[in-house]
Amino acid sequence: AQRVTQPEKLLSVFKGAPVELKCNYSYSGSPELFWYVQYSRQRLQLLLRHISRESIKGFTADLNKGETSFHLKKPFAQEEDSAMYYCARPPRGSARQLTFGSGTQLTVLP
Amino acid sequence: DTGVSQDPRHKITKRGQNVTFRCDPISEHNRLYWYRQTLGQGPEFLTYFQNEAQLEKSRLLSDRFSAERPKGSFSTLEIQRTEQGDSAMYLCAAAGGSPTGELFFGEGSRLTVL
């Protein structure tokens, strides 16, 4: 089965500490990899995508050589980073849809 | 505002009833998706439209579910003979441009089946 796994349902860090949200894939294939974020009482929105090689709100994500992980990192977490984070990737055989992980709830403590 | 609106935001119904959800993207969004999200899970793909054509359907989409996008603008998702297991958040997402460009999500329609 093609799976997108986020092993941590909950993650808490203190403000100013580094944070890493893990995302693992059971399959390789499309380089279209995404992190989506949902802040409290807001809709799901794109945070960053692999193909853009961008850093958004201080977050970066790197695809490992085996194309099986795409962890999200930020060197200094801020309280406003508290949110639900989902990684996503098209399933093999379809470039049109995304398979999402189950999400990690990040809480940044003061 | 992503320009994707969904209605109703919340629907409570009794088992066996039919429900319909509507999604209105902006005109530039030729691609439209329906996802379902249950508690503690990420969004699960249900179906995809390019303009008015339904190009992909998930095996999750039983024959009680039907989606339409008749004029390539708004879309409806109907669930017939609802079951308690249908209780979930139904998310609409839309996009234009490349096949795997950014998806713009609506706020969702929460279904509760009693």
Image (cartoon, grey):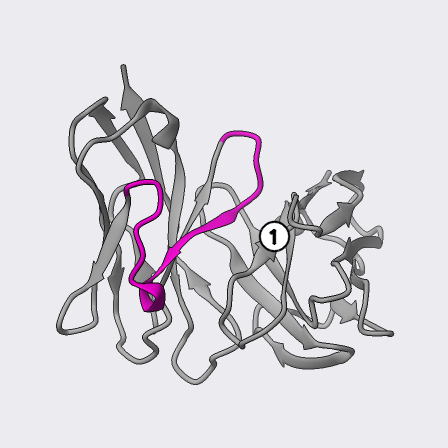
Note whether B12 is above or below B106 in the view shown: above
Q: Please state which amino acid type lies under the numbered disc 1.
A: Phe
Res. A70 visible in picture: no
Viewed as shown, does residue A40 lie left or right of B90?
left
Q: Secondary structure at mark 1?
A: strand
Q: Nearer the viewer, residue A88 or A16?
A: A16
Q: Position of residue A5 (x, y in %)?
A: 29, 57
The quadrant the N terminus of chain A occupies is: bottom left
The quadrant the C terminus of chain A occupies is: top left
Viewed as shown, does residue A38 lie left or right of A78?
right
Q: Position of residue B11 (x, y in %)?
A: 78, 40
Q: Which residue is mark 1?
A: B105
Q: Based on the displayed image, in which of its 4 quarters is residue A3 positioned? A: bottom left
Q: What residue range appears in magenta?
A: A40-58
Q: Position of residue B47 (x, y in %)?
A: 63, 70
Viewed as shown, does residue A70 lie left or right of A82?
left
